[in-house]
Image: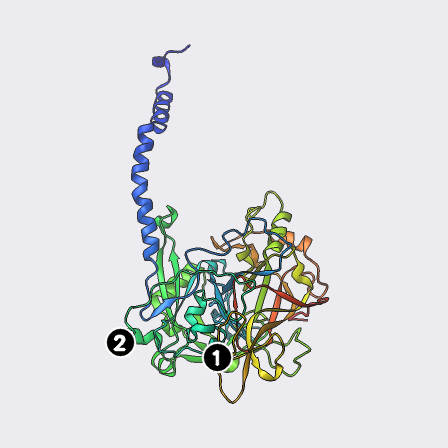
């Protein structure tokens, strides 16, 4: 056996270094150094949520109802709402809610804004055109937060929806979206608490609060500039953008908004250019972060120029105009978690997403549990949540506003007295399947797009609709058949009608 003195000096150094790296003392030293850094990182992440003056943050943000999405859920129970999401800016990170208002154009605040870039059209003319993760996958990393006027706002934000909220009557939208249970039925209810920032103790607005309260709240957008600290896992050098959700006329004039046409698919609606809200240096950092070479702008839906839905319309309401904000084609998207798990099962073993295909890749508004995979493919009409309807449609499922419900609660009559309204189960027309592109290939947690999966597997297993072919289909598109409604996590889905779907293409 060779003596230690006979070992090559380089090998001896390597052996000594290896012994040092594996020594107990070094491991303890490293742990003592990293522990404070970890605590600092966690504290820094918590401090990143800075309250918006006069507002409270809506939604779930310390946990998610999708945390257990990879477990196998029972399929022999009534389908019910597992999670709710809205996406305030098209293609950016969503906001998870415990409950949400629903109108004719979908869940409130969903796809209300979009980023656009200036490009040449087929005629060689410059135009604004919407952007998505299809071209710029890092949009997935743009965090969005919804901040709404606090409950002490003297009811400015109240609407007829509050008639659905039961005995405590005058609740605000923020309380609904922070998890207050909708009233009117006991059966099948599931209370889901929500994290929210505490509201000020005073019931008087301070001058600095008025800016956001007067403009319907604030949409906060945060994105990070890649840095050494990010590479080491200690957060982002973040940038913030604050946008008024519902700017008043004074804000329009003060910030010099413009109304411009913005191309989105085959439509070119007049939209509100709110780019003046973004400091120029922040806008340039955003362009660099996303990898956009051309000019960038932020647009908001103009309520006077919403886009018309023209395909797969409900036959029961042939004369009703159905509109959509900046969603691709339909107001609401629905998807069951069982369908996602089945897709995951079909992925090849070498796929990066194998056994961890996240449902958030599919950007649905309503995620379901309790039904077999792809059961939603057959649905043509469902009920979920509650809505307000004229009393002339009253039936055993309707509760007159102001009447006592089955849990002895009283819905407050705050609707116009010229027309009696009743609380009813909320009906949806299930319009068609959702034709899929390459966007689910983007990992929402990293903003990195896989070259193949899951789209390759989808093309092999979900080419199920001759109207959509060669595009695979996952999830369903829906149209609310009401104007004022609400939905919350835990509510059951009642399937009213089933039938065959044949997809109608946007571009024949």
Nearer to us of marks 1 and 2 is: 1
**Does residue 119 appear anywhere in the picture?**
no
Q: What's the distance in space between the residues labelled 1 and 2, CA to CA?
A: 29 Å
User: Is 62 rendered above or below residue 181?
Assistant: above
Circle 1 packing at 10 Å, graded few (<14), some (14-19), many (20+), is: some
Residue 61: quarter of image: bottom left
Q: Nearer the viewer, residue 118 or 485?
A: 485
**Does residue 122 appear anywhere in the picture?**
yes
The image position of residue 79, as x and y in percent, is 61, 60
Relative to residue 249, is residue 188 drawn left or right? Answer: right
The label on residue 207 is 2
* Quadrant showing the N terminus: top left
Residue 21: quarter of image: top left
- Outermost residue to the bottom: 418
The label on residue 160 is 1
User: Is 471 rendered above or below residue 270?
Assistant: above
Q: Secondary structure at mark 2?
A: helix
The image position of residue 209, as x and y in percent, is 30, 73
* Residue occupying image coordinates x 58% and y 83%: 391
* Quadrant showing the C terminus: bottom right
The image position of residue 96, as x and y in percent, is 47, 62
Circle 2 packing at 10 Å, graded few (<14), some (14-19), many (20+), is: few
The image position of residue 151, as x and y in percent, is 37, 72
Q: Secondary structure at mark 1?
A: helix
> Marks 2 and 1: in contact by CB < 8 Å?
no
Q: Nearer the viewer, residue 73 or 14?
A: 73
User: Is 437 rendered above or below residue 30?
Assistant: below
User: Is 61 rendered above or below residue 199?
Assistant: above
Relative to residue 226, is residue 260 drawn left or right? Answer: right
* Residue occupying image coordinates x 37% and y 18%: 8
């Amino acid at each position: 056996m060779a003596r230690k003195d006979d070992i090559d000096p380089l090998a001896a150094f390597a052996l000594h270094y290896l012994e040092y790296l594996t020594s107990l003392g070094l491991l303890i030293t490293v742990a003592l150094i990293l522990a404070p850094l970890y605590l600092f990182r966690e504290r820094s992440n918590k401090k990143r949520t800075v309250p918006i003056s006069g507002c409270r943050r809506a939604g779930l943000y310390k946990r998610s109802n999708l945390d257990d999405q990879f477990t196998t859920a029972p399929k022999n129970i009534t389908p019910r709402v597992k999670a709710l999401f809205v996406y305030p800016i098209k293609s950016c990170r969503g906001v998870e809610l415990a409950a949400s208002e629903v109108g004719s154009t979908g869940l409130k605040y969903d796809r209300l804004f979009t980023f656009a870039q200036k490009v040449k059209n087929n005629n060689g003319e410059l135009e604004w055109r919407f952007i998505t993760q299809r071209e710029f996958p890092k949009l997935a990393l743009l965090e969005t937060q919804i901040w709404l006027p606090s409950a002490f706002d003297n009811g400015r934000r109240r609407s007829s929806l509050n008639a659905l909220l039961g005995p405590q009557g005058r609740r605000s939208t923020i309380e609904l979206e922070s998890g207050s249970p909708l009233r009117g039925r006991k059966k099948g209810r599931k209370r889901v608490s929500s994290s929210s920032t505490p509201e000020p103790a005073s019931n008087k607005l301070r001058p600095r609060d008025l800016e956001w309260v007067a403009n319907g709240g604030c949409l906060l957008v945060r994105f990070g500039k890649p840095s050494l600290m990010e590479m080491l896992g200690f957060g982002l050098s973040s940038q913030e953008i604050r946008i008024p959700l519902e700017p008043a006329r004074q804000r329009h004039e003060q910030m010099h908004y413009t109304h411009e046409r913005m191309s989105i698919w085959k439509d070119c609606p007049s939209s509100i250019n709110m780019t003046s809200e973004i400091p120029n240096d922040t806008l340039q950092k955003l362009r660099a972060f996303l990898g956009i070479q051309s000019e960038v702008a932020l647009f908001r839906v103009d309520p006077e120029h919403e886009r018309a839905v023209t395909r797969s319309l409900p036959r029961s309401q042939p004369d009703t105009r159905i509109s959509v904000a900046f969603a691709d084609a339909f107001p609401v998207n629905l998807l069951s978690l069982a369908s996602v798990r089945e897709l995951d099962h079909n992925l090849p073993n070498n796929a990066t997403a194998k056994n961890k295909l996240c449902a958030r890749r599919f950007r649905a508004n309503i995620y379901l549990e309790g039904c077999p995979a792809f059961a939603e493919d057959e649905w043509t009409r469902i009920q979920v949540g509650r809505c307000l309807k004229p009393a002339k449609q009253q039936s055993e499922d309707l509760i007159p506003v102001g009447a006592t419900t089955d849990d002895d609660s009283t819905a407050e009559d705050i609707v116009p007295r010229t027309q009696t309204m009743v609380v009813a189960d909320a009906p949806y027309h299930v319009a068609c399947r959702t034709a899929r592109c390459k966007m689910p290939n983007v990992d929402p947690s990293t903003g990195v797009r896989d070259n193949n999966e899951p789209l390759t597997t989808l093309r092999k297993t979900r080419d199920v609709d001759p109207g959509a072919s060669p595009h695979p289909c996952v999830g369903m598109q829906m149209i609310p058949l009401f104007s004022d409604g609400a939905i919350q996590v835990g509510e059951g889905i009642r399937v009213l009608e089933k039938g065959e779907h044949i997809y109608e293409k946007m571009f024949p």
